[in-house]
């Protein structure tokens, strides 16, 4: 049996304090999402075993949504493979990421509903990163975490990247 070990809130506060991703991880995410434009790109960020700080792995996934310009979805097969690989490598899913095409990097009402149907998070302890891709270029990013019964969203500041017009 495969289990998804989300790492819990304490792992996220340690691994992603203040919604800060290591620059090389954010760069990999941005490259994938820019390449997916004009459709939404998506994937997950995995973190290595406890005690292995700084061990991150970006796993781009194909967007299986029937409306890929405005939504994203993972196939069951792709998600199962992520879970199998993570289990074998003793990794946890720290983050699900996707892009918004030619619009703001906000965790939309649809994103919230899919991440927590009926107000119950499907992946407790997992962050959701949204990157705005406008004209094929990343312009801003945000991270949303489940806290106190709802998602709290913060802007990811990254002066090392080309975010020219935040949100």
Image (cartoon, helix red, strand yellow):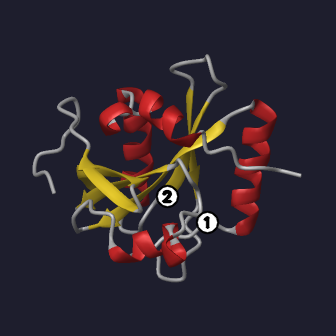
Residue wearing tag 1 = 74
Give residue 87's mark. Answer: none
Viewer can see residue 70: no
Name the residue at 33% across, 71% down. Answer: 108
Q: In the displayed image of the protein, which residue is found farthest to the left? A: 165
Q: In the displayed image of the protein, which residue is found farthest to the bottom? A: 66
In the rendered view, does 62 fall on the left or right side of 80? left
Name the residue at 54% across, 68% down. Answer: 120
Residue wearing tag 2 = 42
Q: Give SS at disc 2.
A: strand
**How far across and how far down the image is residue 90, in percent?**
74, 31
Q: Quadrant of the C terminus?
A: bottom left
User: Do the numbered discs 2 and 1 sit on residues whose CB atoms are within 8 Å?
Assistant: yes
**How far across and how far down the image is residue 77, in percent?**
76, 63
Nearest to the observer: residue 136 or residue 166: 166
Nearest to the observer: residue 4 or residue 135: 4
Name the residue at 59% across, 63% down. Answer: 122
Quadrant of residue 146 in the image? bottom left
């Amino acid at each position: 049996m495969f289990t998804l070990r989300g790492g819990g809130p304490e792992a996220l506060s340690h691994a992603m304090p203040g919604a800060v991703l290591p620059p090389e991880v954010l760069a990999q995410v941005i490259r994938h999402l820019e390449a997916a434009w004009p459709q939404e790109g998506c994937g997950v960020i995995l973190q290595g075993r406890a005690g292995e700080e700084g061990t991150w792995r970006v796993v781009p996934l194909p967007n299986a949504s029937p409306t890929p310009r405005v939504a994203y979805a993972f196939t069951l097969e792709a998600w199962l493979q992520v879970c199998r690989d993570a289990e074998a490598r003793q990794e946890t899913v720290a983050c699900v990421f996707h892009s918004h095409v030619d619009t703001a990097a906000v965790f939309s009402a649809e994103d919230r509903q899919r991440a927590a149907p009926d107000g119950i998070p499907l992946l407790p302890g997992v962050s959701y990163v949204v990157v705005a891709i406008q004209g094929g270029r990343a312009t801003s990013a945000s991270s949303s975490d489940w806290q106190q019964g709802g998602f709290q969203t913060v802007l990811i500041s990254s002066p090392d990247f080309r975010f020219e017009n935040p949100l």
